[in-house]
Amino acid sequence: MLFSTVLMWLLIAAGFVIALPALWLLARGLWPETVARQREVASRGLLKCFLLGLVPLTGSIVLIIVLSKLPKMGALAVLLGGIIVAWGFIGAGGIAALIGERLWPEAAPWRQTKQGGLALVLCALLPVVGWVVLLPLIAILGWGIALRASFMKAPQPAPATPVLPAVETASA
């Protein structure tokens, strides 16, 4: 194997290690309520999320194949594929937040997301199994989590208890 090939794979891996936790931190900073809902969905179980994530996967594969076969639509297919993959990885931020919350319960929420995301991405660097199985699984789970979280109702704030005026009693 040439040195350039080894360097290419090393830089791709480094890109994933930097980009995915940064994407999850960006989502945590821009949409904290959404990430909290995604973390809640991820804590309820991942099998339903996986099965639900297969729907956008098959739909996007069909759409990208159709677009790539049309003349002069290859760039649109690549753009659409990138957006769909990014959406899946953003949804996987719920898994990163959940892992971080379970491993570092006393840390701040953004630190939990960062550290849980690093743990998740470093597992995806496992040769062959991580690249071929775990990384696509993270994206599929992310699609399912994002879909389930979008249908989940936002928690309603607790109603404020009315403040009653103090009643003074006359002392005799």
Image (cartoon, rainbow, N blue to C red):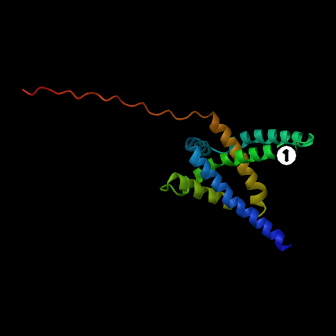
Q: Nearer the viewer, residue 162 or 105?
A: 162
Q: Quadrant of residue 127?
A: bottom right
Q: Nearer the viewer, residue 2 or 74?
A: 74
Where is mark 1, residue-wise?
Answer: 75
Where is residue 59 drawn, in percent x and y? 81, 38
Q: Quadrant of residue 21?
A: bottom right
Where is residue 132 drawn, in percent x and y? 79, 56
Q: Residue at x 78, y 65 (%)?
A: 9
Q: Quadrant of residue 135?
A: bottom right
Callout 1 secondary element? helix
Q: Residue at x 52, y 51 (%)?
A: 109
Task: Work out whether 132 lies above or below 59.
Answer: below
In the rendered image, is residue 9 in sight? yes
Q: Residue at x 76, y 40 (%)?
A: 56
| Quadrant (top left, top right, bottom left, bottom right) of the N terminus | bottom right
Q: Residue at x 63, y 55 (%)?
A: 22
Task: Work out whether 14 lies above or below 149.
Answer: below
Q: Residue furthest front?
A: 72
Q: Is residue 164 left or right of residue 112?
A: left
